[in-house]
Image: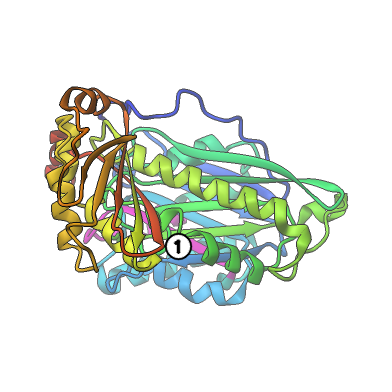
Amino acid sequence: MSSVAVSPLAPKTYPEMPAIDGVRIATAKAGIKYKGRVDLMAMVFDEGTAVAGVLTTSKCPSAPVDLCREHLAGGRARILVVNAGNANAFTGKKGRHTTAVAARAAAEAAGCSEGEVFLSSTGVIGEPLDPSHFERHLSDMVAGAAGDRWTEAAHAIMTTDTFPKLVTRTVTLGDAEVTINAIAKGAGMIAPDMATMLSYLATDAPIAAPVLQALLSRYTASTFNAITVDSDTSTSDTLLAFATGKASARGAPTIETIDDPRLAAFETAFEACLLDLALMLARDGEGATKLIRVEVIGAVSGASAKRIAMSIANSPLVKTAVTGEDANWGRVVMAVGKAGEPADRDRLAIWFGDILVASEGERAESYSEAATSAYMKNDEIVIRADIGLGEGRFTVWTCNLTKEYVAINGDYRS
């Protein structure tokens, strides 16, 4: 667990995570990097569990990402193994060997084929990962796994996170209640082009793998792909969704197409889980003290709006101004102008919260320094830019940039 203080933006309470029928969890203190804390997690699934996922678009992916990409084609999962402290990325033949050993050990422990094994590693890039950690622990972990250990799982996958990220929803599907549980980790190296650092969602609903995949594809764009901490996309980004189908015994219908009208409530809950986790990542950005929502409207297209919003959200000058509680709207103008998207200085309007600070190429006549400065003291800041050229809109969430971010990342390998 991180040695830094818990983020001031952390949740005040955490949900009680119910067991998911068909899912068992175990954790261990493997000593991969951290001393005296859990750093290895296994999630074991009953036979027949469907799986879908989205993975990093990085051209330098980790060995576990390569394995997941290959195994996702099968659409079935029996075990997920995640370690913290070492990303097993950019580790060459040694990394591929460790992944192969881990997959074999996991398959033997779970009694399944290697094609039903999924792996994730998070932590330092470029350091070889000793495969014996998996060989020593996985058999006992699987044997002792239990369904009520979601909170322990969320802790086990943390690196520089200051709090565990977990969410649960229960909805009706057909004649049965079904549950969705999800966990995530991430605090830095976050500018996903798929999902997030690491995130795992499981449900007892009988949802076919192609439907799970369609749901992920539909909602990652407006959730995990709409957050940024530092503009850096990880080599290890992985989002996996698992459906055990066990609720079918209680009357839940099997969902085999994305347009099935019975999917509606589940789909809403699924999206809510992804968004809740994504916002937790932004709240736990390394060193963050403020959550920032960047809303861009009036762009020529949604894609253009997203690029402008990301330009604002990733600007160190905008982020440090928020840290200093300085309503420096000039930096927002700068970020809009540098985005490379259609914009018109004389049509641009900028708000901080509900306060119009600039429009028609100059500071707004109604602008009040005192009112805006008071607003900037809030823990959550909204920056809105109306480009004034069309109907495109997009919302991005980020956090401020503080000295603590530099301190965390300046000695991350030590």
Does 118 appear in magenta? yes
Mark 1 Cα-neighbour bin, 10 Å: few <14, some 14–19, many ≥20: many
Residue 161 falls left or right of residue 331: right
What residue sits right under mark 1 in the picture? Answer: 102
Query: Amino acid type of disc 1?
Result: Ala
Residue located at (24% from left, 57% from top)? 347
Q: Tell me if residue 147 comes above or below residue 254 in the rendering.
A: above
**Magenta highlight range:** 116-135
Q: In this view, does 389 lie to the left or right of 134?
A: left
Q: On the rendered image, what quadrant is the N terminus found in?
A: top left
Q: Quadrant of the C terminus?
A: top left
Q: Is residue 192 visible?
A: yes
Is 217 situated left or right of 125 in this image? right
Depth check: 101 or 202 in front? Answer: 202
**60 up-or-down from 225: above or below:** below
Residue 12: give x, y in percent of width and height: 45, 23
> Is residue 414 visible in this depiction of the protein?
no
Task: Give coordinates of residue 107: x percent, y percent.
Answer: 57, 64
Res 261 quadrant in image: bottom right
Query: Is 370 placed above or below 396 here?
Result: above
* Percent coordinates x, y for residue 55 in the rendering: 43, 66
Q: Is residue 42 magenta?
A: no
Q: In which quarter of the image is residue 25?
A: top right
Q: Residue at 67% x, 51% y: name it.
A: 203
Q: Give the vertical position of 337 relative to 350 (above or below).
A: below
Circle count = 1
Occupied quadrant, residue 391: bottom left
Q: Is mark 1 on a helix, strand or loop?
A: helix
